[in-house]
């Protein structure tokens, strides 16, 4: 069964990078597939190249559907003192997960060959996730409106 059913080149991608002095590399791309603000839904893809780049530390605040469509997704939960779980949870092509409500802060990236993951976000108040600094302080509350604006301004 082929797993390249989704033409990633059809979409515009927004590259996200972090500060070089961080203890982990922040580097990934995302694209917004569609959204309905009145219904509180936003569908997107996140793509990690095989360079070890992560998303920033974040915590989902909405119900989030996750489906791995290429490569792998590696996740490390982050404790309130900043300690990272020793081993990542690994999701492979075809793996599905549903995050309901507010999840633990975590780091995530692709596997050795990178990864592409579909995220279906469902939020009554438009909140998607909180981004943390390495001292575990919330630095940004990401809403659907904020993400859409960032995407439009940077693609």
Image: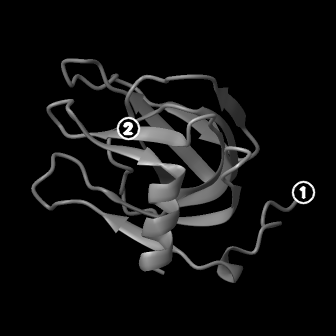
Q: Is residue 120 left or right of residue 132?
A: right
The N terminus appears in which quarter of the rendering?
A: bottom right
* Image height of 7 relative to 109, above or below: below
Q: Indicate the position of residue 107 as horizontal and vertical percent values.
A: 38, 38
Q: Which of 124 and 52 is in front in this view?
A: 124
Q: Is residue 71 left or right of residue 141?
A: right
Q: Indicate the position of residue 77 as horizontal and vertical percent values.
A: 39, 25
Q: Indicate the position of residue 7 as horizontal and vertical percent values.
A: 75, 75
* Image height of 53 relative to 129, above or below: below
Which label lies toward us, 2 or 1?
2
Query: Disc 1 designates what residue?
Result: 1
User: Which residue is at a point 42% across and 47% down the rendered structure image?
Assistant: 142
User: Which residue is at a point 37% across and 65% down the rendered structure image?
Assistant: 16
Q: Is mark 2 on a helix, strand or loop?
A: strand
User: Which residue is at a point 29% across and 26% down the rendered structure image?
Assistant: 84
* Image height of 60 relative to 80, above or below: below
Q: Which of 123 and 87 is in front in this view?
A: 123
* Image height of 124 relative to 121, above or below: above
Residue 81 quadrant: top left
Q: Indicate the position of residue 141 as horizontal and vertical percent values.
A: 36, 42
Please report whichever mark, 2 or 1, sits nearer to the chain's N-terminal start: 1
Mark sitting on residue 130: 2
């Amino acid at each position: 069964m082929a797993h390249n059913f989704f033409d990633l080149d059809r979409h515009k991608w927004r590259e996200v990078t972090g500060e070089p002095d961080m203890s982990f590399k922040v580097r990934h791309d995302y694209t917004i597939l569609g959204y309905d603000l009145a219904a509180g839904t936003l569908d997107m893809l996140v793509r990690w190249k095989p360079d070890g780049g992560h998303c920033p530390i974040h915590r989902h605040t909405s119900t989030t559907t996750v489906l791995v469509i290429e490569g792998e997704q590696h996740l490390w939960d982050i404790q309130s003192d900043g300690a990272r779980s020793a081993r990542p949870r690994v999701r492979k092509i075809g793996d599905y997960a549903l995050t309901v409500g507010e999840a633990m802060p975590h780091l995530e990236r692709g596997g050795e060959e990178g990864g592409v993951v579909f995220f279906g976000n469902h939020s009554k108040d438009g909140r998607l996730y909180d981004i943390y600094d390495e001292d575990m302080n919330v630095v940004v509350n990401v809403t659907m409106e904020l993400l859409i604006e960032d995407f439009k301004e940077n693609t």
